[in-house]
Image (tube, helix red, strand yellow):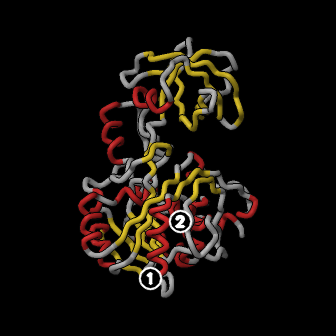
Amino acid sequence: MKTEKLDYDLPGELIAQHPVPDRSDSRLLVLNRGAGDIIDSRFKNLGRFLSPGDCLILNNTKVLPARFFACRPTGGRIEGLFLAESAGGAWEVMLKGTRKLKPGETLYLKDKRRNNFCKAVLLEKTGRGRCLLKIETDANAETLLDKIGFPPLPPYIKRDDDPVVAQADKLRYQTVYARISGAVAAPTAGLHFTNRLIEQLQQGGIDFAYITLHVGAGTFKPITTENLEDHRVHAERFTIGAENARKINDAKDRGARIIAVGTTSTRALETMGASRIEAVTGTTELFITPGYKFKFIDAMITNFHLPKTTLLALVAAFAGLENILAAYSYAVAQRYRFYSYGDAMMII
């Protein structure tokens, strides 16, 4: 399939720069993938489109404050994104403006008040902006990022290093059920849930099961190949525990709908490639494109995705490319808010 088929026009002003004041007040576009019908609603009314016994699968990964700032001894400012910590303690990071940096150079990591916090030595430039840093502190990555890190918002959301704004993003660029640290991007379909809404749905007979998939920096990466089949999707770590696997299988056995909240939950479930879910810890590089035959999920809750991305390919595979492009065109006309801090879609 040609990648250009995953393109659409979006006015820049529809890219949400901030979330709505109340998470569940975001709009909800409900798309019937069989008939192509569309219903406009609000996320707080999600229960109207669910039935008792339905099982929602939520990704409980917790977003690290992975964005940080550093400076060179000359005073040049650098922005970075933490990706992972190696067994030896080195950081794998992405740095903006690495052209002039050389291995062996010392950088000063800044705290949230823009003061020098600790030193880091550039060990290696591994290509495409990725580098290895030796951090001169005994603290582990999570502890250090808590001191110096900012929410890793995607580049289309404009932010600087203002600590007041960062504090608000720290709360909102995180699901209310986030538990296990490791993501460098949020599973954004879950940002619309409040604890109150979850309680209301549970009281209405809706079941919840949790998986953990640590969303990586590649989640927003555009597909640059001419053909979808030539693109390699980024690997992401995931875990499905025994108790949650049992909940999901029990729901499937009684004929209830399995509803994935987000593309991350979808990929984790579909990676299993079977009619039953087993407890597992592993990685997935599953690239779901139009033509893929879904094995497990019956419905999906998701956000609106960027053109020419693996996320748009996945929802097009589930709902049909024509349906998705028509729904996106409708959403643009109706002034829905797009991307991470934007509105939601439910595909049934």
Q: Is residue 114 left or right of residue 201?
A: right
Q: Earlier in the sequence, mark 2 or mark 1?
A: 1
Residue 162 appears in view:
yes
Foreground mark, 2 or 1? 1
Name the element at disc 1: loop
Name the element at disc 2: helix
Front residue of this view, candidates 225 and 69: 69
Position of residue 59 relative to residue 104, above or below, is below
Residue 219 location in percent, x, y?
57, 52
Give the crowd class for mark 1: few <14, some 14-19, many >=20 residues within 10 Å: few
Residue 65 location in percent, x, y?
44, 37
Q: Residue at x 55, y 17 (%)?
A: 136
Front residue of this view, candidates 48 and 168: 48
Q: Residue at x 62, y 31 (%)?
A: 87
Look at the image and tell me in which quarter the N terminus lies.
bottom right
Look at the image and tell me in which quarter the C terminus lies.
bottom left
Q: Which residue is mark 2?
A: 266
**How many labels, in total?**
2
Position of residue 297 relative to residue 69, above or below, is below
The residue type indicated by label 1 comes to Arg
The residue type indicated by label 2 comes to Thr
Q: Which residue is mark 1?
A: 254
3D distance between C-alphas at marks 2 and 1: 20 Å
Front residue of this view, candidates 65 and 229: 65
Residue 234 location in percent, x, y?
64, 51
Residue 304 appears in view:
no
